[in-house]
Image: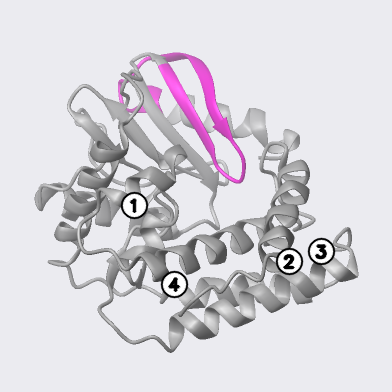
């Protein structure tokens, strides 16, 4: 979040909690990128704050409630207040149960939690974009020189070609698809005493389970039953190309984003130079 917004966003979260009789004298920043994640004390609540235009927060709250009812491993909204989106001073604020970090999630536990999440998602009828729609967004970003002015032309061509070819491969493969988390990477998994819990449900989309699994640690892929390993390799490269594209957006606020974008471009180029076949 931009520095000019940060103090206002923190104040919005603290004021929201205080108005609901949750004392919030202190706010500890846990994560700061396009959204702000805070631990509010002494009430010990997790607050997520985004600009008010970020109306997908309502979708996330509704989906979290439905997934929790289905027994899915997802983070719970704060039980002491009504589960809804709060608006204050140009921001939307949602309040969640805070969990102290427990231990590193093992690949087997990661895969099991994702499998249970997917099982619950298959029971829901929720409108969501296809995962290739998000690939298309990345493609448009790469093609827009005004939005990605620091991206060298050779790198622009590499990213655009990778996204285009893998998008086509995924879209034309056929096979089973379902509702997905969309970005179940380790940053969106809480390690708790009751097991892993998924957060940040606003990226929900439809597609093959391999697209979700491509965000998980590589070792988790060996513990998820019935995975198409060739498709998983393709999805891993596709996801890498997508997140690389986001890092070159002039408005990207991800910590160390440009450094990561450069590093990931190198990985994509190395894969292409080894003549890796993305999908057989």
- Tag 1 residue: 221
How far, Cα to Cα, is label 1 from label 4?
Answer: 19 Å
CB contact under 8 Å: marks 2 and 4: no
Q: CA distance from mark 3 to mark 1?
A: 33 Å
Give how far apart the Cα atoms at labels 3 and 2 are.
24 Å
Q: Nearer the viewer, mark 1 or mark 2?
A: 2
Q: Assign a secondary structure to mark 2.
A: helix
| The N terminus: image quadrant | top right
- Residue 36: x %, y % from top left: 55, 36
Q: Are marks 1 and 2 in contact (CB under 8 Å)?
A: no
In percent of the image, x 33 and y 71: which residue is there? Answer: 208
The residue tagged 4 is 131
- Secondary structure under tag 3 reads loop
Mark 3 to mark 4 CA distance (whole Å): 22 Å
Q: Is residue 275 visible?
A: yes
Q: Residue at x 63, y 32 (%)?
A: 8
Mark 1 → mark 2, Cα distance in angstroms: 25 Å
Mark closer to the chain start, 1 or 4? 4
């Amino acid at each position: 979040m931009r520095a000019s917004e940060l103090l206002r966003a923190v104040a919005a979260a603290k004021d929201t909690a205080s108005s609901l009789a949750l004392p919030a004298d202190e706010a500890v920043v846990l994560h700061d990128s396009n959204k702000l994640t805070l631990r509010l004390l002494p009430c010990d609540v997790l607050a997520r704050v985004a600009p008010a235009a970020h109306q997908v927060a309502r979708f996330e709250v509704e989906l979290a409630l439905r997934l929790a009812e289905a027994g899915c491993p997802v983070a719970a909204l704060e039980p002491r207040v009504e589960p809804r989106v709060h608006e204050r001073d140009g921001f939307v604020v949602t309040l969640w149960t805070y969990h102290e970090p427990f231990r590193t999630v093992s690949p087997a536990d990661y895969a099991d939690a994702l499998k249970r999440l997917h099982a619950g998602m298959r029971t829901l009828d929720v409108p969501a974009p296809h995962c290739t729609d998000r690939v298309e967004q990345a493609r448009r970003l790469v093609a827009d020189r005004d939005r990605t002015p620091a991206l060298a032309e050779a790198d622009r061509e590499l990213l655009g070609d990778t996204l285009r070819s893998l998008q086509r491969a995924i879209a034309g493969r056929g096979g089973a698809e379902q509702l997905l988390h969309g970005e179940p990477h380790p940053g969106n998994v809480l390690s708790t005493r009751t097991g892993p819990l998924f957060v940040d449900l606003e990226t929900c989309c439809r597609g093959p389970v391999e697209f979700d699994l491509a965000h998980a640690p590589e070792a988790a892929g060996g513990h998820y039953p019935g995975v198409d390993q060739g498709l998983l390799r393709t999805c891993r490269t596709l996801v890498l190309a997508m997140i690389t594209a986001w890092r070159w957006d002039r408005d990207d606020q991800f910590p160390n984003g440009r450094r990561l974008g450069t590093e990931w471009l190198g990985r994509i180029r190395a894969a292409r130079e080894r003549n890796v076949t993305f999908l057989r």
